[in-house]
Amino acid sequence: MPISLGAHAAAEESALYGLLKNATKIGGVFDLGYREASVLTNDRWLERAHGLPQHCLVLAYPTGLDDPAKAAQDVLPEDRSILLLRVARETSLPNQADLVHLRAEHTDRAITNYYRDSDPPAPTTDVLTKSMMQQAAFRCRILGTFVEDQSGSLVFGKDVDAVYAAAGYVVAKPYGASLQTVVDHVELPMGERIDDQHGDDAPNADLPDTDETMTVGTLRYSSARRREQVGAKEGRPTEVDVKVRPKDFVAHKTAVFGMTRAGKSNTMKVLASAVHLYSHKTGTKVGQLIFDPAGEYAYANRQDKTALSQLGDNVRIYRLGATDQDRAKRIRPLSLNFFDPSQIDGCWSLISTFLSASQVQYVKSFLNSDPSRSPAEVEEYGDKRRLEAVRAMYFSALIRAGLRPAADWRYSLPVNQHTRALLALVNGIDTGSEGTTYLSLGARHLLAACERIARQANAITRANATTRQKKYTATDIEAVHLWIADESIGGSGDSGVDGVVDMVSPTGSAGGWKQLLGMKPYHAAEATSDFAPAIYADLARGRLVIVDLSRGGDQVLQTCAERVVTEILARASKRFREGKPPRPMQIFLEEAHRLLHRDKFNQASQSSDPYVRLAKEAAKYKIGMIYATQEVSSVDEMILSNTANWVCAYMNNASEAQKLSKYYDFADFAEQILTADDRGFVRLRTDSSPYTLPVQVAKFDLRMVNDVRRACGLDPTEPSYDFAPELGDDDNFDDCPDPDDIYDAKFSPPAPTLFDSAGV
């Protein structure tokens, strides 16, 4: 009685048969284990299959399974499965020594015949011997087993459930539709499967899924591609599309490893496009934040005239030092108005981040002054006056450091009659009438007044008791008592005052206000809001935000980025505590080795580091990270172990490849990672992919942009000419005078001798 092969096994539309329909036989298995299999082949079969490159995917199946008419009778039900193998390396046959001897003898004969001058030539190799010499064997990694479920659909298991000594497996190289089926196969990751235990859910498990996938590149087995191209012309293509499930990247960690110029930035753009597509197709607001230190995301690429901002109308760009021309393009300034009371919290946070590494005592005292405390929220009159005095000194230090408020900006300086008498000595200040408790001063006069007050306050504070008693009267102390901390000498008792006074009027070799020079790039008098909450608000609404930091140095980049990440974490943590649903977000981090290195995770003092917190807490807030770096070892192992998606390009360091080999099946690709330096040639492993694939990542160009726009229901866009400003070609060396000119000016050249003047 015939035995049916599942629900559809006897028909040509059987999923197993479909998997073998477009496949070229290359040999058979002669040694099968649980993890590896050895395949016997020969040159003729390999030629017909257009070669068998390393990492090539091949299928091993019982004899007769590829014939629907015979499979029902010739193949036992429990054997109706297909093993998926990956070619790992060449291996030896039992008679390998004899084969090598025959090949050497044949090669010697061929060379001899070529150079032989006399006839007759040496006899050629007979057909049988030549056939034996063409035998070869390959060792293959077993990736798993394809079987059919009761509905006739393909199901993949990541191992084998039986090993036969004489298995009789035929091996074929899939191409076209069959290979596309293998590459497209996905399995729901742990935490998303229907039968998973509740409570072990993945961070994105409750987010909606979509059948919509995105093509990120093509399958590519090797750096040399001639045979792949020939196979495609003859109707047996192996460069099939590689598609990803966009949800894999949402609320998960994604690593992008590779040398500079290996295509990491292009890959990041492709991943951002995939998440953008997911957000649109599911109606889920997923904000994406990209810190752009080189301007390669904010500006259009000159080669293909494509910019990430062309994906849709929900892209926002923040630029450090945005010009009027930038603002006309709706590019928002990445700056704060340091003299706007409504933005003072953000400004002080920025200053605190900028100066946090300083070990100088007066800087630490300054950070303790906290001028962000609002006088308006204090009821006690004395406390209010002290806070107003601190703010006056704070604003003065900023002005002295070169930050300029708006032309009509003024500040109310708290004074008494003795303070007014002291300031009467300062040119241009109207000290007001009797009983005046505030002086409304512009920037220039506020600085002059505070410098005068600070000098006297410092002098009184630093004088010993005898000198203070001889030199200063009670009136002198009363004039500046708001700016003196020591209550024993008539001060206000505010411990933060001394630090801010020292910034305005530094003593000795202290830099004082010079510590704040680095704040100038962050200040814009016309800034109307704090950029960190504004960026968070954009992300909460599912927008793609690009923070262009190309016009600032490393310190500017780091400070701005930390400010924004801190804001995001603070908001996410607050929603979590209040029991509100998290807002999914993605944060892209370039040069991640500076932010996620293991030293940060080993130091308890760094527990407040925003990137350490991001790595540890991101999952519960549904915040995903896409981090790119050159070295695997520079990233803390806790992050690597919790990274769901991996993109590995060329690396030239064997120890880094070895480190990578500890994860998934990247050990199979270690040699290729060290040698194949083709740009965009990566090894890709996603959360729902059951096996790693070698992929040529697609170029992020106008075609990809318009494909995404079309999928989102938008009209195609035109090329963008918003390029990054070109640097001038002329270099007049203004910043580095010619040492020859300096030397000649200091040491005049000797007068010419008689022989020199005579031309001898």
Image (cartoon, grey):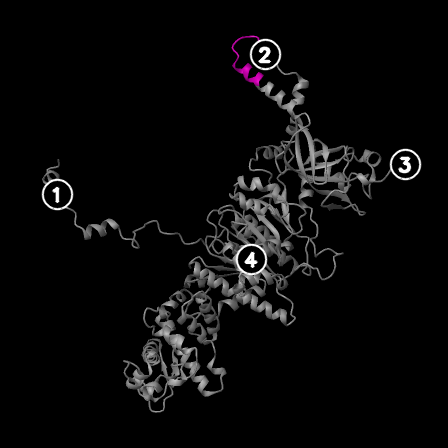
Q: CA distance from mark 2 to mark 4?
A: 73 Å
Q: Is residue 239 above or below residue 388?
A: above
Could you tell me which quadrant the N terminus lies in? top right
Going by the numbered disc 1, the residue's amino acid type is Pro
Q: Position of residue 157 (x, y in %)?
A: 73, 46
Magenta residues (range): 108-122
- Residue drawn at (18%, 51%) of the image: 747
Residue position for label 3: 1
Q: CA distance from mark 3 to mark 4?
A: 62 Å
Residue position for label 2: 122
Q: Position of residue 675 (x, y in %)?
A: 53, 39
Q: Earlier in the sequence, mark 3 or mark 2?
A: 3
Select label 1 or label 3 by which is in front.
1
Residue position for label 1: 752
Q: Earlier in the sequence, mark 1 or mark 2?
A: 2
Q: Residues within 10 Å of mark 1 (few under 14, many from 20)?
A: few
Going by the numbered disc 4, the residue's amino acid type is Gly
Q: Earlier in the sequence, mark 1 or mark 3?
A: 3
Residue position for label 4: 312
Q: Is residue 565 above or below residue 505?
A: above
- The question of residue 110 being in magenta is answered with yes
SS state under label 4: loop
Tag 1 and tag 2, C-beta contact below 8 Å: no
SS state under label 3: loop
